Image: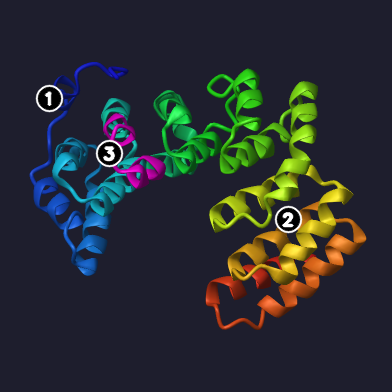
């Protein structure tokens, strides 16, 4: 990949701030307090830290690479430096790093011009979860994720990819995509018992986009029987989105139960949705 030309030449174009070297070393350490301090300092250094972030990536641990991607995305400038950091990330041998690059790009739509062409390469990654993350990151950009590509992904043998693609297709004003997504519905419903929670989560997100009564009974079953609390919460949110009377009733009952949960994160989400319904 050479979207931004020779990375070495790019790094030479931008001076490294002297404080960036020790700050990046702290960012890649195993000390949580040092890492937090380094995040703040590096963002404050801005563009002067970007060359050092890039240089540190090859020898950093996977967890540290993810931190580098996160901080670089916050700085964002110069765009060429951000580009070469992402180029390195999407070629990383660890799928978690590649997936994190897609996640961070999805959270920074203002950087799509720089990041979307790079993330596109992950659409055909060998790991389905990375593909799904790339689809999500490119969902709002038809120029980088075409209708023809979406049609192919809706029929993908990997359920997490197919479900993610169907969810995106249903948000586009394209009759051909809508027909393909409708045809995929029975297959998606059949995968609500998939052994992988992340796959069930992707299927639930897709079913929530259909907004159709046939998806309500299977989602209510998930809401009542899935052993993973986060999956049950996802089903409740999908049912709220569908918003038929029985879907809304089941979702609100579940959210009231979650509002008394010992899990602080689930309780916060439940309270947020309940307040919105008041």
Seen from the viewer's position, the closer of residues 234 and 224 is 224
Magenta highlight range: 87-100
Q: Distance between the residues labelled 3 and 1?
A: 26 Å
Position of the N terminus, as image quadrant, is top left
> How many C-alpha atoms fall within 10 Å of the one at disc 1: few (<14), some, or many (≥20)?
few
- Residue drawn where x is 84% and y is 59% of the image: 217
Discs 2/1, front: 2
Discs 2/3, front: 3
Give the image location of residue 8, x and y in percent: 14, 23
Q: Residue 93 carries which label?
A: 3
Q: Residue furthest right?
A: 245
Question: Which of the 4 image quadrants contains residue 126?
Answer: top left
Q: In this view, does 17 lie above or below 118?
A: below
Q: Which tag, 3 or 1, sits closer to the chain's start?
A: 1
Give the image location of residue 10, x and y in percent: 19, 22
- Residue drawn where x is 69% and y is 45% of the image: 206
> How many C-alpha atoms fall within 10 Å of the one at disc 2: few (<14), some, or many (≥20)?
many
Question: Which of the 4 image quadrants contains residue 102?
Answer: top left
Q: Mark 1 points at which residue?
A: 12
- Residue drawn where x is 71% and y is 79% of the image: 257
Main secondary structure found in the magenta portion: helix
Asked if the magenta segment contains residue 218, the reply would be no
Asked if labels 1 and 2 touch by Cβ distance under 8 angstroms, the answer is: no
Q: Is residue 20 above or below residue 39?
A: above
Q: Which tag, 2 or 3, sits closer to the chain's start?
A: 3
Position of the C terminus, as image quadrant, is bottom right
């Amino acid at each position: 990949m050479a979207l931004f030309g020779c990375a070495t030449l790019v790094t030479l174009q931008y001076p490294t701030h002297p404080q960036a070297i020790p700050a990046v070393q702290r960012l890649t350490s195993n000390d949580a307090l040092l890492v937090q301090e380094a995040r703040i300092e590096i963002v404050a250094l801005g563009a002067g830290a970007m060359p050092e972030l890039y240089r540190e990536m090859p020898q950093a641990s996977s967890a540290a690479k993810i931190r580098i991607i996160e901080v670089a995305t916050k700085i964002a400038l110069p765009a060429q430096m951000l580009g070469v950091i992402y180029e390195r990330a999407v070629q990383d041998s660890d799928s978690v790093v590649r997936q994190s690059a897609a996640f961070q790009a999805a959270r920074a739509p203002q950087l799509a011009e720089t990041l979307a062409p790079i993330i596109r390469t992950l659409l055909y990654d060998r790991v389905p979860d990375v593909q799904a993350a790339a689809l999500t990151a490119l969902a709002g950009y038809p120029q980088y994720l075409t209708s023809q590509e979406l049609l192919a992904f809706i029929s993908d043998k990997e359920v997490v990819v197919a479900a993610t693609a169907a969810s995106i297709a249903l948000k586009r004003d394209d009759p051909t995509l809508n027909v393909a997504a409708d045809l995929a519905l029975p297959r998606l419903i059949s995968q609500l018992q998939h052994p992988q929670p992340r796959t069930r989560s992707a299927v639930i997100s897709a079913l929530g986009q259909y907004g159709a009564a046939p998806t309500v009974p299977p989602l209510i079953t998930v809401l009542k029987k899935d052993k993973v609390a986060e999956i049950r919460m996802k089903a409740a949110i999908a049912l709220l989105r569908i918003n038929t009377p029985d879907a809304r009733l089941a979702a609100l009952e579940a959210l009231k139960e979650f509002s008394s949960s010992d899990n602080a994160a689930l309780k916060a989400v439940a309270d947020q949705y309940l307040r919105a319904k008041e």
